[in-house]
Amino acid sequence: MDRRWLPLNALRAFEAVGRHQSFTAAAQSLRVTQSAVSRHVITLEALLGVPLFERRPHQLTLTEAGAALLPVVTKAFDRIETALGDVVSDAGVRRRTLRVRMPPTFAHQFAVEIVREFRRDWPDLNLEVESPHGVGPAGRDADLSLVYSKPQVTDDVADLMWMVRLTVLCHPELLRRRPAESLAALIRDNELLHVRLENEPRYMLWQQFVQQSGLGEIDVGRGQVFDTAILAAQYAMSGEGVALLDQHLFQGEIEGARLIAPFDVALENGYGYFLHIHPEDLGDPAVMAFRSWLIRRFGGAAEPETAPLQRGRLRRVETG
């Protein structure tokens, strides 16, 4: 469709109805009549040749076509709104804002560092960081999304940052209070800290670790459950419990001896951190600038070396 004939008013009406799931609420938000909103949506459906909503008594739902179109239109209007706001707020000096999604633990560990370093290299680009819960796929209302997931086939362009290696970590004080002669004894005799994965059994990670490590029958259905790895790590750093945590994600805590790895065993369960962008954004200079910068910062990060541990600490690994 030629952009000269894009039905902007109809798209705005469709976006409002899709966002509010109501013609009445959409009309109120746009400060127009309900009949005007309905007419615009009908015009758009006629132009596209497909229905965008299923209209039932007291119920309005998006069709498959509507569900595919809505996030794209919303994102486009968000970009326009942000760009106009930036121009006005900076007295005509345009500063682009990129919406970046990160998992909560990734954001806690790296967001401040990323924003500080990226802004130093790209002072005309602002980052708006969000940290929703959940395990992949990426949301369509962000410019870029860092996703914790297994490799998956999606419409997005995905760049691997690193594959996760889960290691048993605890605070040094815990071992001083209760030395462990073996990995099995460490797990069996201490409180286990679990990180819940969406749509997975709450004890899955420890079950996989015990099975892969050949530790026999150990009860892992006990201990505390957290919905983010950073909470499990903070609890472990208080001196209580042992946690399965990613070596690279908590490299700073390991190097600072706030967490130690008493045994050189890791679980690779197929999860990793991936940067997702939408294919239509490959031509966006701002998106590509951040993508290239982040790949240089994290992409191809070497998996932490697993040389024998000395004094309960992992050896430092330099990553590009």
Image (cartoon, helix red, strand yellow):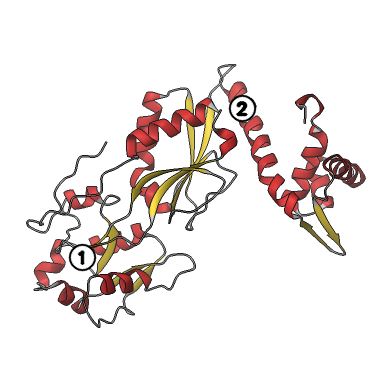
Q: Is residue 201 above or below residue 127?
A: below
Dot 2 alpha-carbon crowd within 10 angstroms: few under 14, some 14 to 19, many 20 or more: some
Viewer-proximal residue among 244 and 223? 244
Q: Is residue 55 above or below residue 304?
A: below
Q: Which amino acid, mark 1?
A: Gly
Q: Residue at x 45, y 28 (%)?
A: 289
- Image quarter hosting the C terminus: top left
Apparent side of residue 70 relative to residue 253 in the rendered image (left or right): right
Tag shown at residue 239? 1
Q: Residue at x 21, y 76 (%)?
A: 215
- In primary-sequence order, the first of circles 2 and 1 is 2
Q: Residue at x 41, y 72 (%)?
A: 202
Dot 1 alpha-carbon crowd within 10 angstroms: few under 14, some 14 to 19, many 20 or more: some
Viewer-proximal residue among 271 and 56? 271
Residue under pointer 2: 83
Q: Residue at x 69, y 48 (%)?
A: 68
Q: Which of marks 2 and 1 is in front?
A: 2
Local secondary structure at mark 1:
loop
Viewer-proximal residue among 50 and 55? 50
- Image quarter hosting the N terminus: top right
Apparent side of residue 307 relative to residue 103 in the rendered image (left or right): left
Apparent side of residue 203 relative to residue 191 in the rendered image (left or right): right
| Residue 274 in the image, given as x and y percentages of width and height | 42, 47
Q: Which amino acid, mark 2?
A: Ala
Apparent side of residue 194 relative to residue 32 in the rendered image (left or right): left
Tag shown at residue 60? none
| Residue 113 in the image, given as x and y percentages of width and height | 34, 38
User: In which quarter of the view is residue 169 placed?
Assistant: bottom left
| Residue 45 in the image, given as x and y percentages of width and height | 85, 45
Instruction: Determine the CA span between mark 2 and mark 1.
Output: 48 Å
